[in-house]
Image (spheres, coloured by chain):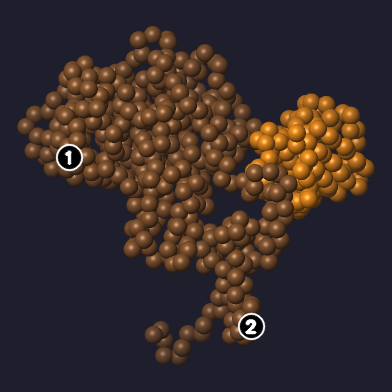
Amino acid sequence: MTVKLNFKIDGNDFTRAGEASGEVKRVLKELGLPSDVIRNVSIALYEGEINMYLHANGGQIEVAVSPDAVGMVLTDSGPGIENVALAMKEGYSTADDNIRSLGFGAGMGLPNIKKYTDHMMIETEVGVGTTIRLKVYIK
Amino acid sequence: MNIENHSVRLREDKCKGCMNCIKRCPTEAIRVRNGKAYIIHERCIDCGECIRVCPYHAKRAERDTLDLLEGYKHKIALPAPALYGQFNNLDDIDRVLTAFKMIGFNDIFEVSKGAELISEATRILLKRGELKKPVISSACPAACRLIRVRFPGLISNVLDLISPMEEAARLARIKAQEETGLSQEEIGVFFITPCPAKITAIRQPIGLAKSYINGALAIKDVYPKLLEHMNHLEDTKPLRESGIIGVGWASSGGESAALLREHYIAVDGVENIIKVLEEIEDEKLTNVDFVELNACTGGCVGGVLCAENPFIARSRLQRLRKYLPVSCNHLESDEIPEAMNWTTSLKELSVLKLAENVEEALELMSKLNSISEHLPGLDCGTCGAPTCRALAEDIVRGIASESDCIFHARDEAGNPSFEGPLPPPFRKPSEEGPQ
C-alpha cells in the first residue's frame, strides 16, 4: 500500500513555503512514522520548497509513502543547475542580495537535502528545469 | 487519560450542540454528537479555549471550593502570581496575602517563591550547557500536553524540573511540618489557579508521581472573597517573600526574562505555540536557547479562571514591579536539590496515529484521502466534526459515517429544492423596505 500526496508550489509568495512540507508532516504523524523520519522528510521538503520559490518560480512536489520508505519527487521548470557538483557544495549559492536579505541563500539548500535523505538524485537541464528524487527509509 | 483527571468538562443540560467549541479547539478534541458536545479526552489538553468561546457556558473547569479546607488542620494557600494582577490600584501584595488569613487559611506560600527557585535552577542548567537546545519550558501543563500529543519528537527538549506550583507546595509542606509538628496528612495545600490545565496537572502530575497539592481553587472564585476583606483590613502582615522575578512569571516573557540571558523567545497562545513547535521540529529555529510557552494569551494572566482581562492584569503587574525587589529566593548552592528534578518522564500520547502499524495506517490514510475528496470541503461543522478532513478521519476510525455530512445526505435525498450551491444568493430587498 502506498499513499500519494501531490502539491503545486506557487512561486509568487515565499511566505507560503513550508505549507507542503507542513501538510506532509501532519500526514506522516497520523501514519505513526518515527519522529526522526518525519523530521528528515519535512526538513528536506522545506529546503526543496524554498529552492522552488527562490530559483524556479514554483513547481510540483509528489510524495509517496510506503511501509519501508518515503519517496519524494520535486519538479520545476526553472533555469536548471549549471554545475551540480558546485551547487552541492556547502555555502555555494547563486541567490542574489534580495534573497539573502530575507535570510535565505546561505548555500545550504541542496547540501541539507542530501544530509537529511538516504537517497538523492538530481536531473537537471539548463533552461528546461530540475527534478530531484529523494528517499528517506523507514527503518 | 481518565476523564476524572480532566478539569475541563461539559454541562450537558446547557449545551445547545452548536459549532463554536469544535471549531476553536486547537487539538480537534471536540465533536457534537446527538445534539451535544462530546470531549475526546485523550486529545484534550485542558487549555480552556472551549470554556472561553462557549456562548452558553456549557463548558466548565471542574475545581474545588473552600469547603475542602475543612478536612485539614493546617491550611496553606498557594496563590499563583497572576492573582496579584486582578486587583485595581494594588501597591502592596501583603494586602492580598493577609486577606487569605481571613477566609480560612492558616498560612500562605507564594508560588512566585517556587518560581524564583526554578528560575535559578534553570539558569544553572543552561550555564552547564548539558541540555538539548532549544530548551522548552515545562511550566504550562497545556503546552506540555500539546507536546505529548502533537510533538512527541520534542519531548527530550522539555525542561525536566518540576513546576513553580509544585516546588512551592513542596517547600510549604516542609515549612508547615517544622512549624506545627503536624503530620503531612493534616496539612492541606491549596493552589489558587488561573486555569484548568493546572488543576489537571495536580490530578495527573507532570514529572512526579504524586502532587504535593491537595486541591485547587479558581482565582475568580477566591477574588471576590479576598476583596471583601481587603477593603476592611486594619493592618497587613509582612507575608510577601518574592520579587520581580517570581511575580513576573504571571505574564508571558516573565519566565524567560528571569533567565537573565539573551536568545530566548516567549510564545503565548496555543496557535502560536503550534507554529513555533513546528519550526523547532523542522530545525528552522536556530540561535534560540530557551523557548517559553504559555497556552493562554498574555501568559497565566490570560487563564480562563482569572477575573480580569489579561492586558489589564499585565499592566497592573507592571505597576506592582516598582514596589518589589528583584528576587527574594535563592538556592543554597549551585547544586540543584534532588526534589526539583522530575522523577517520571513525559510520555508520548499517540492519539493522532491512525493505527499502530504503518501498513494498517497507510490503508486507512488511503481511505481517508479518498473520502476527503468526496466531501464538500466547506468545513461547516454540521456533521459534528470541526473540518471535512476531521470527519473523514472519524469515518475511517469507525466513529462517523459519510451520511453524517448534510451535503452528502442532500444529494442522496435528491430533493431539487436543495440543488445548487449553498447558501442561496442575496435575496432582493422587498419594495416595502426592511421587514
Q: Chain of mark 2?
A: B
Dot 1: few (<14), some (14–19), or many (≥20) neighbours within 10 Å?
Answer: many
Element at label 2: loop
Q: Position of residue B245 (x, y in %)?
A: 35, 24
Residue under numbered circle 2:
B414
Q: Amino acid at mark 2?
A: Gly
Q: CA distance from mark 1 to mark 2?
A: 63 Å
Q: Horizontally, is B197 left or right of B173 in the view?
A: right
Q: Amino acid at mark 1?
A: Leu
> Which residue is nearer to you in this view: A68 or B233?
A68
Look at chain B in the picture and name its colour: brown
Residue under numbered circle 1:
B226
Q: Position of residue B53 (x, y in %)?
A: 40, 56
Look at chain A in the picture and name its colour: orange
Residue at the extreme right: A125
Query: Residue sitting at 85 percent across and 31 percent down?
Result: A87
In the rendered image, is residue A101 in sight? no
Element at label 1: helix
